[in-house]
Amino acid sequence: MRKSFFADNPSVLWFLACLGLFTLGVTVLAEATGAGLISTSFVKTLGKVLCLCLVAVAMDVVWGYCGILSLGHFAFFGIGGYAVGMWLMYARTEAIVIQSLAERTIPPTATELNDAIATQIFGVVGASEFPLIWAFSHSLILQLMMVVLVPGLLALIFGWLAFRSRVTGVYLSILTQAMTLALALYLFQNDSGLRGNNGLSGLQNIPGFEAVPQSVISMGFFWASALALGLGYVLFARVLTGKMGSVIRAIRDDEARVRFLGYHVESYKLFVFTLTAIVAGIAGALYYPQAGIINPAEIAPIASIYLAVWVAIGGRGRLYGAVIGTAFVSLLSSWFTGGGAPNINLGFYTIQWTEWWLVLLGTSFVAVTLFFPGGIGMIFDKLKKGTS
Amino acid sequence: MSTLLELSGVSVSFDGFKAINNLAFQIGEPEMRAIIGPNGAGKTTFMDIITGKTKPDEGRVLWGEKSINLIGKSESQIAREGIGRKFQKPTVFEDQTVRENLAMALKNPRGPFEVLFYRKSADGALRIEALAAEINLTEQLLRKAGELSHGQKQWLEIGMLLAQDPRLLLVDEPAAGMTPAEREKTTEILVEAAKTRAVVVVEHDMEFVRRLNCKVTVLHEGSVLAEGSIDHVTQNPEVIDVYLGR
Ligand SMILES: Nc1ncnc2c1ncn2[C@@H]1O[C@H](COP(=O)(O)OP(=O)(O)OP(=O)(O)O)[C@@H](O)[C@H]1O
Ligand SMILES: [Mg+2]
């Protein structure tokens, strides 16, 4: 079956080859592993882009293939980040506290140690005790399970309630956005247990690897992100081939008709929604250690809207389109907002890209939606048609 | 011939307007039945009720040997019970190939995980080939359904209906927009299907109904006005009144 899957989907092999080449190229040029032409911070940027590509592929599956315009998938991404961030922060703070208490003649008791860690982490929000949700933060394994379980369960419950009552279209989008907004607002509160708007920080420091320079750690995360993107891509391509893909696309085009064929549409939507939420969580768990910090602003609805914009510009309904759109727009965005693009002096007015970039992005989005509904991915479709 | 489906005392109203009014209906297995009636008589609504799209305000819809009540069951459950439907406006999945459309309809387990791990079987492929031959679409198997002509789409939908292997087929205006030759072919397919199943055909075209050569039910203002052979009902003064009186 494996063999026939790749034989039926040559584009998956093409994608994997491109991803492999890209990863190899970056490795050869990077500071830690090669020529040193790519700085550590740019390796991190590229690694983060790969994670964004992964969540965009998930978004494309749920929106481009299944027709559910979810404005909540970046929330699942953020939850994955928080889940892994809790362990990172706990373990690192624990190491620091143990070190600082080491000089004392009497070794600290377990409670003393615990209180010291809690004060260290929650001092910024005026608390000195671990909230309940940090119960597993001492365990990497358990927190990694949270990366999968929390987005998965949240998507399952939310999806079950929404799909069961047959909320569709724009109403469903609004509902997912409301969920995202509620989550962000909750996290902004100081007593949310996740340090309010301070968020979690210092995530780039990996406990146990203090002696390893960031240049090497960043390569590790870059490779892990590339691997995750590759695996996620194959997973979704597998889900979307054959009869399953047929049913999923049919639901997008006419869900009532699919019901009369005997398919329980809600189960299919729930499956797609939950699976993509889990992958989004995993992508977030890889992203935030590279970003170093996560705060509730990351989860705000606007992030999920960006996700939809990337997928639309790349061309929805094509997995590679989501990757291309995300890589293209997010790299361009960091070029423009990072001051890379030269300002344009019109004499009477200077266009500063740090401010005007969003206007450009918005205009491009409208233009793509109106004039090129196939997005950038359309070009590849044309090429494919030309060769066959 | 045993009773397969029985409706009794079924009524439904939309904003106070009674679309179906104390309707009683029975069909056996196998049987072919034509339903005629003027526009707005409630023919499509009748099918909506059987297939679970519309919940009636009162009445019973009993199905099968065990007389299960279909009211309250979901559309997909009812379809899995063995009731297939062709819509008045042909609805096929235009973005997918004829083969994919048929494969989706093919009688197989319908759960997401069963479908995810479904393996194409030689059996299924043969069944699709046979169906395609039956509906004259063998050459079109790899084409997108959206590229088909109107008549071919109608056939594809009939093919999808047969692929489900239902015990009851509800066919809403199958001959609309077809050429005379296409109509003849459609009649053949339906007559063939009715040898082993219950088939309900809604049609306006009297010639078409005559060729089905079966019992006819006349629907008017949501209830049965007359029932019997085509000659019997067309001579019924009330029926003449309804059709010609306005
Ligand atoms: N969902 C609905 N909401 C309101 N009124 C409806 C609805 N569905 C049907 N009706 C009304 O119920 C009546 C019966 O409609 P139905 O579609 O069943 O007629 P029909 O016999 O199929 O007619 P036609 O021959 O034109 O297809 C019509 O007057 C229609 O306007
Ligand atoms: Mg009708």
Image (tube, coloured by chain):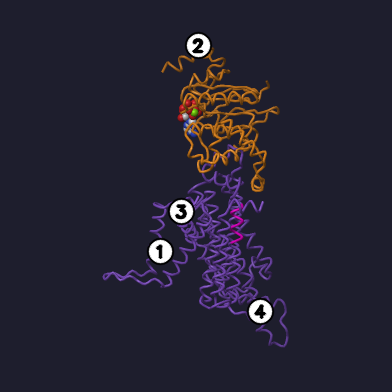
Would you say A297 lies left or right of A221 here?
Answer: left
Disc 1 from disc 2: Cα separation: 74 Å
Q: Amino acid at mark 3?
A: Met
Q: Which numbered circle lies on residue A102? A: none
Seen from the viewer's position, the closer of residues A184 and B173 is: B173
Q: Which residues are magenta?
A: A230-238
Question: Helix or strand or loop: what does disc 4 sit on?
Answer: helix
Q: Which numbered circle lies on residue A378? A: 3
Q: Is residue A214 above or below residue A168?
A: below
Chain to which mark 1 belongs: A
Q: Which residue is mark 2?
A: B235
Q: Which residue is mark 4?
A: A95
Chain to which mark 3 belongs: A
The local crowd at label 4, few if under 14, some if 14 to 19, many if 20 or more residues have their Cα within 10 Å, is few
Question: Helix or strand or loop: what does disc 2 sit on?
Answer: helix
Q: Are marks 2 and 4 on the same chain?
A: no
Look at discs 1 and 4 and give the one toward the viewer: 1
The picture quadrant where one finds residue A283 is: bottom right
Q: Are marks 1 and 2 on the same chain?
A: no
Disc 1 from disc 4: Cα separation: 42 Å
Look at discs 3 and 4 and give the one toward the viewer: 3
Residue A30 x/y as whole percent: 54, 75
Q: Is residue A236 magenta?
A: yes
Q: Colour of chain B?
A: orange
Q: Is residue B4 above or below residue A200?
A: above
In purple, which chain? Answer: A
Q: Determine if residue A230 is in view.
A: yes
Q: Are marks 1 and 4 on the same chain?
A: yes
State the residue at coordinates (65%, 63%).
Answer: A146
Q: Which residue is mark 1?
A: A358
Residue A293 x/y as whole percent: 54, 71
Q: Amino acid at mark 4?
A: Ala
